[in-house]
Every structure is written in C-alpha cells, then in structure tokens.
Image: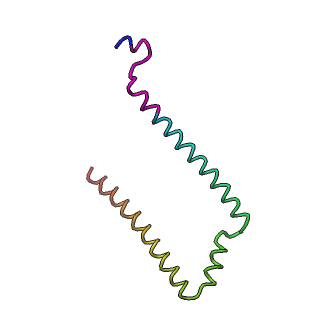
Amino acid sequence: MTTNIIRGKANNRFSKSNDTMFRRILLLLLLIALASVNAQIDDADIRKKSKRPLAELKAKYEELPPIGKFGVAGVGGFIGSRVALKTFIGAAKVAGATFIA
C-alpha cells in the first residue's frame, strides 16, 4: 500500500468514477450555458418582430368561431389543471416525506 501512495496511485479505484462524474457535471453546465444564450437570442428576435409577443396569438384566437374558442378554452383548462395538480401533488409528496423524516 505504501508503494501505491508513493507512486501516486492511492484510491485508484475511485479516480475513474470521479473523472466520469466531473465530465458529466461539466457537460451539464456547458449545456445549460448554451441553452441560456440561445434563449436570450430568441427572446430578442421575438421582441423585435412584435412589441407584444402574444399579439399574433390573440389575433388568431379572435378570428375563431365560438365553437373554436370553446375548444381552445377546454384544452387550455385541461392542460392548466394538469400542470397545477402535478405541481401540487409533488409539493404534497415532499411535505409528507419531510414530515415523516
């Protein structure tokens, strides 16, 4: 064991996993940085095209017949309720786990 420490090979079995984990974290940080730069560019382009980003969607919605508006509202309500319930259930699970621990 002392010869491994002298040669710099102490904890050799962990060095490969640490190196892999370090590379994964570095890659993740790089991807997050690239995504944020890309999002900023896209936001700037959208704001240049339209002062109100939702103006085009609102205009299209106003052109729909009443049954189309009803369908859009139904789908929007369904998606909104799913998102809200999923968030609430996740928070309840965390609170329950915290209470038990």
Q: How was the colour assigned to the protein in this rendering?
A: rainbow
Majority secondary structure in the magenta region: helix
Q: Is residue 37 above or below residue 61?
A: above
> Which quadrant of the figure has residue 81?
bottom left
The image shows residue 75 at horizontal and vertical percentages of: 48, 76
Q: Find the residue positioned furthest to the left.
A: 100
Residue at horizontal 51%, vertical 80%?
Answer: 73
The image shows residue 77 at horizontal and vertical percentages of: 47, 76
Whether residue 12 is in magenta: the answer is: yes
**Count of numbered circles on the image:** 0
Q: Which region is colored magenta?
A: 4-19
Q: Is 55 in front, or is 3?
A: 3
Residue at horizontal 63%, vertical 75%?
Answer: 57
Q: Is residue 84 above or below residue 6?
A: below
Residue at horizontal 28%, vertical 54%?
Answer: 99
> Which quadrant of the figure has residue 95?
bottom left
Whether residue 8 is in magenta: the answer is: yes
Left or right, 61 with respect to 45, comes to: left
Q: Is residue 1 above or below residue 46?
A: above
Left or right, 34 with respect to 2, comes to: right
